[in-house]
Image (tube, helix red, strand yellow):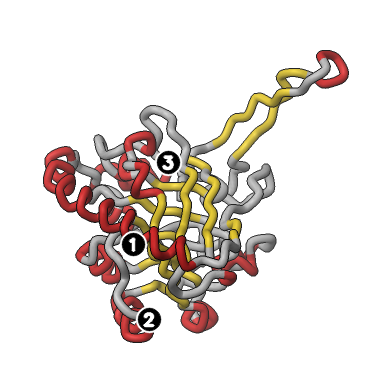
Amino acid sequence: MCNACVIESVKQSMISRRSLFAGVAATGAAAIAASTLAARPALAQASGKVVDLTYVFDETFPTFDGVPGIAYEEAVNFDASGYQLWKITFFEHSGTHIDAPLHFSKDGLSVAELAPESLICPLCVIDITAKARDDANAALEAEDVEAFISAHGEIPKGACVAMNSGWGAKVATPEFRNTPDGKFAFPGFGKSATDLLAQMGVAAIASDTLSLDPGSSADFAVHNSWLPSGHYGIENLANVDQLPATGATIFVGAPKHARGTGGPARVMAVV
């Protein structure tokens, strides 16, 4: 999710969270350690199948503000020089990408400061496709998390919890982003769910839509709570419907540029 006007409208609600991160550090370290331990058996039991969770990123890929997220300029021509090179300009929050805490906090962790251990996680996938069929702005709420736990067992500390809303089927259509009359419409996480997941020590959340929050959100409650608390998110995750509810391990190839609020990422899962 990235739109300069939207960010401007909500930034007054963002406060410095540096003191919060000091308190989060201890629990964050524990979550990372738990994540590493949990990921090992997931890898050991995997069949070795790799699922690419990343969309091809070009000028046509849907963006939050409707402006192309990437632009290419030829820097070196093959016919003239024997090799070729592009100069690429892109917005951090476009394509399949990561949201770092700094995205919605004044001085939170940048994408370069995320612990590498937190980028390899046990993966849990919560299916809300039935709910999303009835409501384009459906939210994954605490009750969905509790139902998942009842069916599949506890969510490991340090895990990444991904939402499967079925929205990937719409990615090549205008309905991936909005209704025919131009209103944002796509599923996302509800704050009741992310508050619960934070209490459980979950490291990251991931959506198969343009945003962590539903399209109808007016306050970006999840962005404004999940990210400043030291967690990260992933948006526009592909092929979520090819994943099991549990048992996979996700690998988040996050960029590592200084002061980054996020950026396009290569994300894969081993099943």
Report the amino acid beneath label 2. His
Residue at 28%, 55% in the rendered image: 226
Residue at 27%, 70% in the rendered image: 192
Residue 31 picture location, percent across and down: 24, 55
Q: Is residue 96 visible?
A: yes
How packed mark 2 is, by other alpha carbons closer than 10 Å (few <14, some 14-19, many 20 or more), is: few
* Residue 71 to residue 68: above or below: above
Q: Are marks 1 and 3 in contact (CB under 8 Å)?
A: no
Q: Is residue 215 visible?
A: no
Q: Which residue is mark 2?
A: 152
Q: In the image, 218: left or right of 175? A: left
Q: Which residue is mark 3?
A: 262
Q: CA distance from mark 3 to mark 2?
A: 31 Å
Q: Earlier in the sequence, mark 3 or mark 2?
A: 2
Residue 263 picture location, percent across and down: 48, 40
Q: In the image, 127: left or right of 18? A: right
Element on which disc 1 rests: helix
* Residue 215 to residue 136: above or below: above
Q: In the image, 47: left or right of 72? A: left
Judge depth for marks 1 and 2 and give the one in front.
1
Q: Earlier in the sequence, mark 1 or mark 3?
A: 1
Report the amino acid beneath label 3. Gly
Which numbered circle lies on residue 38?
1
Element on which disc 3 rests: strand
Q: CA distance from mark 1 to mark 2?
A: 15 Å
Q: CA distance from mark 1 to mark 3?
A: 25 Å
